[in-house]
């Protein structure tokens, strides 16, 4: 539609002598009619999206608009504005691992078991060094570690079964034996894939106390030995949860979020329509506990070496209870589908008891008039221990002694040469029977 019967209007009509100086210094202003302008070209709105027409120009062809992705151009800007933030960022841990490490003759070996086996080996190495450092009987370590490990395994499994009873309710035998139920109703070996650390700590501590008392040892001195090892075991063993795709928190966009497949989702997160597998990642709670264990072990070892003059035997175990309790209390609030007691996660109640036990124990043991004996006073006397310089001096002195002994042996092997002066003093001829003849018999009348 074209405009008609429009009044002639000048574009520029400055006052005489002004317009040419200010408004139009070059004298380019002209008058025109609005009727010469098409207000709306015919055919507008007839085109379909992304449809090219004969009168379209190349620069008119624009890519289709994608809702949530398209960014409008800013005419005259040096660069387009930054794209909107995406809902998820690239991941450091973006795989769903196989829980089985290898199968030997059809028998599966799980990463979960390997993680705990490596953790036990590393824990034993730490405990052995701490036992020697504190001058305790290392012969008791091996037997004691087996007893405590079995007790911790039973306590951890019992806690896990109660915590995740919905998984074992239909087949209680799978809670006791490492079995799983196939779709046809038969059983197959599955291995133990669930342990609750609070239950393992509780029952393991009780077993350690009974064993130490029966061997007439100091429980608190051995507690300082065990405390760093507990952190080491936690730091390594928690990686078994990664391979089992468990112990994760709510969705996150942090770079270290982990992917969980649909079979291992719990609660509302099992809805893969609402939480797509490709774009939904979760907080790795196992990783947070593992890092906490590494830092905790280093801190306890540093305190034992650098601040032992302020410690009482057993303080390291009390610090462990506080450290672990705070960590688990904070992370338990991020878990879904955990065991609750009147709406409160049971693990938070248990770990709160750990925290109170540790704090009250430290306050009592360091109260007025205590302690009578410090931890440093119970360490063996190392003043007589040999230093590396002493070992080096002994090494070189032993070589010198060996060289002197070799010289003496060579001299002893050489035959003695006759002395010419001694031969000159002896007479050449000795008559038989004379006094000089030593072979003559004793003279008659001489005393026998």
Image (cartoon, grey):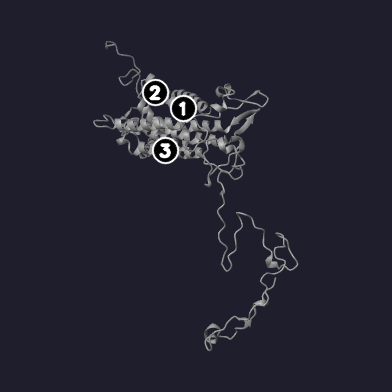
**Residue placed under numbered mark 1 in the picture:** 199
Q: Quadrant of the C terminus?
A: top left
Q: Which mark is residue 296?
A: 3
Using the image, determine if residue 74 lies above or below residue 67: below
**Residue placed under numbered mark 2 in the picture:** 209
Nearer to us: label 1 or label 2: 1
Whole-percent x and y of residue 337? 52, 33
In terms of secondary structure, where does tag 2 sit?
helix
Q: Is residue 295 left or right of residue 195?
A: left
Query: 9 or 141: nearer the eye?
Result: 9
Whole-percent x and y of residue 205? 41, 26
Q: Earlier in the sequence, mark 3 or mark 2?
A: 2
Please say if the residues under marks 1 and 2 sit with CB atoms less than 8 Å apart.
no
Q: Residue at x 33, y 28 (%)?
A: 426
Q: Earlier in the sequence, mark 3 or mark 1?
A: 1
In terms of secondary structure, where does tag 1 sit?
helix
Q: Earlier in the sequence, mark 1 or mark 2?
A: 1
Q: Is residue 130 visible?
A: no
Whole-percent x and y of residue 135? 36, 29
Using the image, determine if residue 68 lies above or below residue 290: below
Nearer to us: label 3 or label 1: 1
Dot 1: within a 10 Å radius of its alpha carbon, few (fewer than 14), some, or many (20 or more) residues?
many
Report how far apart the C-alphas of labels 1 and 2 lie in the structure. 16 Å
Tally of numbered discs: 3
Report how far apart the C-alphas of labels 3 and 1 lie in the structure. 20 Å
Report how far apart the C-alphas of labels 3 and 2 lie in the structure. 23 Å
Q: Is residue 81 visible?
A: yes
Dot 3: within a 10 Å radius of its alpha carbon, few (fewer than 14), some, or many (20 or more) residues?
many
Whole-percent x and y of residue 191? 58, 27
Dot 2: within a 10 Å radius of its alpha carbon, few (fewer than 14), some, or many (20 or more) residues?
some
């Amino acid at each position: 539609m074209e405009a008609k019967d429009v009044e002639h209007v000048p574009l520029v009509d400055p006052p005489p002598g002004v317009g040419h100086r200010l408004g139009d210094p070059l004298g380019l202003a002209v008058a025109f009619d609005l009727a010469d302008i098409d207000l709306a070209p015919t055919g507008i709105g007839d085109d379909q999206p992304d449809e090219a027409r004969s009168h379209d120009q190349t620069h008119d062809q624009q890519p289709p608009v994608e809702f949530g992705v398209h960014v409008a151009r800013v005419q005259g800007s040096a660069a387009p504005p930054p794209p909107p933030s995406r809902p998820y960022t690239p991941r450091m841990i973006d795989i769903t691992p196989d829980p089985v490490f290898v199968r030997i003759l059809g028998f599966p070996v799980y990463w979960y078991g390997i993680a705990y086996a490596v953790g036990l080996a590393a824990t034993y190495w730490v405990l052995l060094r701490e036992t020697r450092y504190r001058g305790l009987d290392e012969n008791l370590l091996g037997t004691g570690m087996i007893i405590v490990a079995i007790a911790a395994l039973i306590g951890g499994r019992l806690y896990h079964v109660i915590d995740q009873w919905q998984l074992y309710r239909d087949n209680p035998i799978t809670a006791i034996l490492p079995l799983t139920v196939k779709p046809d109703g038969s059983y197959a070996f599955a291995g133990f894939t669930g342990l609750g650390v609070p239950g393992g700590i509780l029952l393991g501590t009780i077993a350690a106390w009974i064993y130490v008392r029966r061997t007439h040892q100091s429980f608190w001195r051995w507690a300082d030995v065990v405390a760093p090892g507990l952190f080491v075991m936690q730091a390594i063993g928690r990686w078994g949860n990664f391979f089992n795709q468990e112990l994760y928190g709510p969705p996150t966009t942090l770079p270290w979020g982990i992917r969980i497949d649909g079979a291992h989702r719990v609660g509302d997160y099992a809805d893969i329509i609402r939480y797509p597998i490709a774009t939904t990642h979760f907080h790795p709670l196992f990783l947070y506990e593992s890092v906490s264990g590494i830092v905790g072990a280093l801190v306890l070892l540093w305190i034992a070496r650098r601040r032992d003059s302020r410690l009482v035997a057993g303080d390291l175990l009390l610090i462990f209870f506080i450290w672990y309790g705070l960590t688990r209390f904070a992370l338990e609030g991020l878990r879904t589908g955990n065991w609750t007691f009147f709406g409160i996660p049971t693990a938070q109640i248990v770990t709160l008891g750990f925290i109170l036990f540790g704090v009250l124990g430290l306050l009592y043991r360091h109260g007025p008039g205590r302690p009578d004996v410090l931890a440093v006073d119970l360490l063996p006397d190392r003043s007589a221990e040999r230093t590396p310089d002493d070992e080096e001096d002994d090494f070189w002195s032993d070589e010198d002694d060996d060289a002197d002994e070799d010289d003496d042996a060579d001299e002893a092997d050489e035959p003695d040469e006759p002395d010419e002066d001694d031969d000159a003093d002896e007479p050449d001829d000795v008559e038989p029977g004379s006094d000089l003849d030593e072979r003559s018999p004793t003279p008659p009348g001489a005393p026998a």
